[in-house]
Amino acid sequence: MLWITDTLHIADWELSEQFVRASGPGGQNVNKVSTAVELRFEAERSPHLSAAVKARLKRLAGRRWTNDGALVIQVEDTRSQAQNREIARQRLAELIRAALVAPKRRIATKPTPGSQRRRLLAKTVRGEVKSLRGRVEDEG
């Protein structure tokens, strides 16, 4: 079981891990030992997350979200399988915690009269600058 907050946890059946060989430098160790971890969380089927949280999680996950509604996190940071496993679980928990926070609703406000005046003045000045860029006529 993976605890996200004091009240929210992810059940073991929702998580699956697969250990694969890591890429990059590491000598013989990289060819022999499967230290990289691929953590798969069945987010779409999870009964612990609301629909709004799932939608935010999908947006935050980006390319890590699969077509069948799973979130896949790959970690190959260390040479230790146990450390990589723990890092993957921490990253999943952080991602879910970020999705739990609902964004604040934006309150539409009117521009102040002063800001409107400044904007129009800036447009006028900019227009004058551009009008001076035309072809120069000879007075002669």
Image: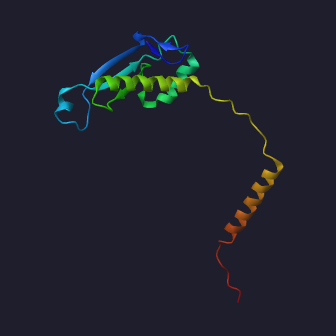
- Residue 91: x and y in percent read 44, 27
**Is there any visible trace of residue 65 in the rendered image?**
no
Seen in the image, is 20 located left or right of residue 132? Answer: left
Quadrant of the snapshot with the C terminus:
bottom right
Res 39 seen here? yes
Seen in the picture, residue 110 relative to 99 is either above or below; the reply is below
Residue nearest the observer in this picture, 109 or 83: 83
**In the image, residue 85 lies at what x, y percent?**
35, 23
Q: Quadrant of residue 67?
A: top left
Where 24 sits versus 11, above or below?
below
In depth, the one of 119 and 137 nearer the eye is 119
Q: Position of residue 48 (x, y in %)?
A: 52, 12
The front one of 133 and 7 is 7
Asked whether, in this view, residue 111 is left or right of residue 72, the answer is right
What residue sits 51% from the left and 24% below the top? 57
Instruction: Identify the coloring.
Output: rainbow
Quarter assignment of residue 100: top right
Q: Is residue 58 left or right of residue 13?
A: right
Q: How many marks?
A: 0
At x 37% / y 21%, what residue is drawn? 39
Task: Name, please, the residue furthest toward the bottom.
Answer: 140
**Outermost right residue:** 113
Image coordinates of residue 93 in percent, x first then y, are 47, 22
Residue at image point 68% right, 72% down: 132
Q: Residue at x 42, y 20 (%)?
A: 70
Q: Quadrant of the N terminus?
A: top left
